[in-house]
Amino acid sequence: MKLAHALLAALKDYGAGEIFGIPGDFALPFFRQIERAGILPLHTLSHEPAVGFAADAAARYRGTLGVAAVTYGAGALNMVNAVATAYAEKSAVAVISGAPGAAEGRMGLGLHHQVKRLDSQFLVMCEVTCAQAVLDDAASAPREIARVLTEARRQSRPVYLELPRDMVEVEVTKVPAYTPAAIDRQAADAAADEVIARLAAARRPALLLGVEVRRYGLEKKVAKLAKKLAIPAVTSFMGRGILAETGAPLAGTYLGLAGETGVRRIVERSDGLLMLGVILCDTNFGVSQQQIDMRSAVHAFDGEVRLGHHVYPGVSLEALVDALLKRAKRLGDAAPVAAVYPTGLKADAHPVRPLDIATAVNDLFARHGPMPIASDMGDCLFTAMDIIPTALVAPGYYATMGPGVPFGLGLQAASKKRPLILVGDGAFQMTGWELGNCRRQRWNPIVLVFNNAAWGMLKAFQKDTDYNDLDDWNFADAAPALGGKGVRVTTRKALAAALEDAVADKKTFRLIEIIIPRGELSRTLERFTGAIAKKSALGKET
Ligand code: TPW
């Protein structure tokens, strides 16, 4: 079979459901084969960052593989930030880039889209992916594809495959099927024995659940484990939304001093904290990492389990969870505390604050059922902490702006469900334009633009400056030109009505531009800025 077909069949076999892409001349032969083979649907977008973000959201939703296909140089390098996001936040995106053919490379001329050397792009991609291959040899290509895609699945990180344009139609053999890593049960059992002993000896054991639980498809098993142990369970910031679909009671989301006090106490007072799949980073641990007793904590992440100075390498999260499930017994006695979220918006003429948006969305979900959410970086993401947990795709660690809208498009393509997109006006300026692709693809997200006419988060950190103020762009007016419907709301009453109206109309995307008075912040961001101010004041005293 043709190399392109072998690659497409392998992408599907390894879990991909679609391809997001933008072609270029080095990628045209591959794109033709994508269309002709019909193995995976192709969704073209407008700008490469969005291609990467959409593929990332699809990978996150499915817990398998997302695919981003681009051209050499101008295309692939335009996508580096999105691939970096996937790397940092552990999302298995396969980047497929076109490239010059062997004869072109030998010409000795600088080729268009070439940076310093022909392999400059490869070197850049090495830094943001966990495995790479150039498919320039028909004999080894199937093995190379299998090696690289296997790493994507096992490590849940992006990978890079470069497909020179003269290789697309060469004949190759089938790509070997995906085989999950062999599990070392003995190592997993030994680790689980020690973990259970540690939890049983603790006076206040607790569970902190992170994003790997979703990435490796372990939500049901972990929900069962939490129930068996009957100890308080919370998610990390990145892990927000995991277990939402299992109905398991969670006490909330840990955000250090920026989060709820009750949740902070559970985590920081625990003398036996079991962290499953949690990325150790400043956003997950807020501004109070030093208050967690890491010596008594257990950290299972990236295929190893750490307890104090003991390390069990080669124990996947799934192997550990399986072994824990076999041993778990009731350790806690308290009925699990489930978090409470604001409902019952006062639909009056009051201007809209971020908390009102969360309340309005909670009311909407109560009436019509939950929607999966894609959020950008900004106060919209902190506002999401007051929304009833549901599947959430957001850049909670790498914290890039721009993914909100394209995450939402990828989420809809993968889930086939209508998503809710939360995005600030600054971030919407970056990638909001991608909504113009909805009509063609029959996507119909509901988009809430938090318009505070500012880079509000930055302004919250630096109040005495003007350069963080933005102009008012009238985003609602732009919606019809992009094939959707838009409305601008300034009061709580208008917001509630606009949400109802949007849910009722499934024909196009709906953009609700919510005017928020500058300086109004979510509760989480208020606490966050307060904690930072307090910390820097303390720092000055010492
Ligand atoms: C790609 C730095 C973090 S938050 C922020 C900036 C510029 C302001 C966001 O403004 P927006 O939302 O979207 O209006 P809000 O709630 O704050 O008003 N460039 C990139 N990523 C990041 N994170 C920045 C700059 C930043």
Image (spheres, rainbow, N blue to C red):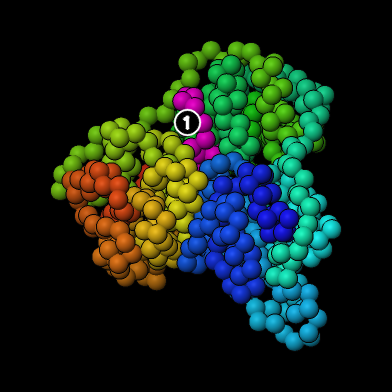
Main secondary structure of the magenta stretch: loop
Comparing 1 with 276, the one in front is 1
Q: Which residue is mark 1?
A: 245
Number of dots carrying numbers: 1
Magenta-span inclusion, residue 128: no
Q: Can you see residue 492?
A: no
Q: Residue at x 54, y 27 (%)?
A: 233
Q: Residue at x 42, y 42 (%)?
A: 417
Quarter of the rendering containing residue 36 = bottom right
Q: Is residue 111 left or right of residue 264?
A: right
Q: Measuring from the top left, give residue 421's x and y in whole percent.
A: 39, 50
Residue lying farthest to the right in this orientation: 139
Q: Residue at x 28, y 33 (%)?
A: 367
Mark 1 crowdedness (10 Å alpha carbons): few <14, some 14-19, many ≥20: few
Residue lying farthest to the left in this orientation: 349
Q: Measuring from the top left, give residue 212's x and y in whole percent.
A: 62, 39
Query: Which residues are the magenta region?
Result: 236-250
* Up-down relation of residue 346 to residue 225 (above or below): below
Amino acid type of the residue that numbered disc 1 sits on in the rendered structure: Glu
